[in-house]
Image: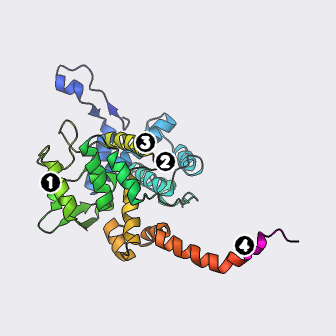
Amino acid sequence: MDVRRTGSGSGSQGDDRRKPRVSPLRQRMIQDMELAGLTPATQRTYINAVCALQKKTGCRPDRLTEKEVYRYILWMREESGMAKGTFVTQLHGLKFFFYRCLNFNWPLFTTKKIRLPRQSRLPVALTQEECQRLFAGFRKPVYRFCSLAMYTLGLRISEATDLKAENILASQMLVRIVGKRNRERAIPLPPSFLHALRRFWCTHRHPIWIFPNAKRTGPLYHKTLYRAFHSARSRAGLPVRVTPHALRHSFATHLAESGVDIRSVQILMGHKSITSTQIYTHLTKPMCLDLQQRLDGMFGNASQKGGSHER
């Protein structure tokens, strides 16, 4: 069976007809991921990685050969334009599926070294004024407050949509987040944001989720948040390269600009390595202005002479 969801056929139960069934292969992968202790966000990412492979090849993934998967990974790296971080997560998802779930002992996932894409893009960070314009562009409070949580707490989109009432430790003014690879971190909760969250929660009073979906059956769907974000981005006049993840980048950049030391930013972001955090120091305005002044003092005279028309 493939990993995509399948229809339930023409059974007699009305509810069953409305609910898509999960294929046995997909269910097996989910069970293996749960056994491995992967977070729901990581599970979704890994499943999407296998679904993307199936869509690209047009074949059930468990019927692909090692050579076919090799060509797909080569395409991801060389032709797709995929960012380095996305490539890594997609690769991990494929490895989990073939090596852990299917027990395919391919050298591709056991012994071969796979070089990452060469490009390393700088993260996109908004100014505080741009963030305010963006938040004003949301039409529904649930999307506005979920996006505001990403910016105020530095959350990934899955961490924001999956935020539960039990994660808000109001007595300690902390938010407990379980992020990538099941790593837990505590983020200080600004009093103003706590009050705003309480006012928003009173509009739906869901016993579990801070940001429930429209049917109140679970957390906010990623796709609906993405659509709302894109509409708000358009109303704010921001470029299309601004994605929801830019709010997390903006959180880290603004902390660095305000003088918070890089080690503290690393802890708040949940980065395993400080090298992942240090990139935000390149985006701070104080550093850019300081470097501009230093470079102008060092090379300004040469530029003036080089621009002269004297012979």
Q: Position of residue 277 (x, y in %)?
A: 42, 69
Q: Mark 1 falls on what kind of element? A: helix
Instruction: Specify the amino acid type for callout 1.
Output: Arg
Q: Residue at x 57, y 46 (%)?
A: 75
The segment highlighted magenta reads: 302-311
Determine contact: label 2, label 1, CB under 8 Å.
no
**How would you rate the neighbour count of disc 1 (Cα within 10 Å): few for under 14, some for 14-19, many for 20 or more?**
few
The mark found on residue 303 in the picture is 4
Identify the mark nearer the N-term, 4 or 3: 3
Determine contact: label 3, label 2, CB under 8 Å.
no
Identify the mark nearer the N-term, 2 or 1: 1
Q: Position of residue 218 (x, y in %)?
A: 20, 42
The label nearer to you, 2 versus 4, is 4
Q: Residue at x 49, y 49 (%)?
A: 241
The Cα–Cα distance between marks 3 and 2, rounded to whole angstroms, is 8 Å
Residue receiving disc 3: 234
Q: Mark 4 falls on what kind of element? A: helix
Residue receiving disc 2: 239
The Cα–Cα distance between marks 4 and 3, rounded to whole angstroms, is 40 Å
Comparing 169 with 192, the one in front is: 192
Q: Quadrant of residue 309?
A: bottom right
**How would you rate the neighbour count of disc 3 (Cα within 10 Å): few for under 14, some for 14-19, many for 20 or more?**
some
Compared with 101, 216 (above or below) is above
Identify the mark nearer the N-term, 4 or 1: 1
Q: Position of residue 40 (x, y in %)?
A: 28, 51
Q: Mark 2 falls on what kind of element? A: loop
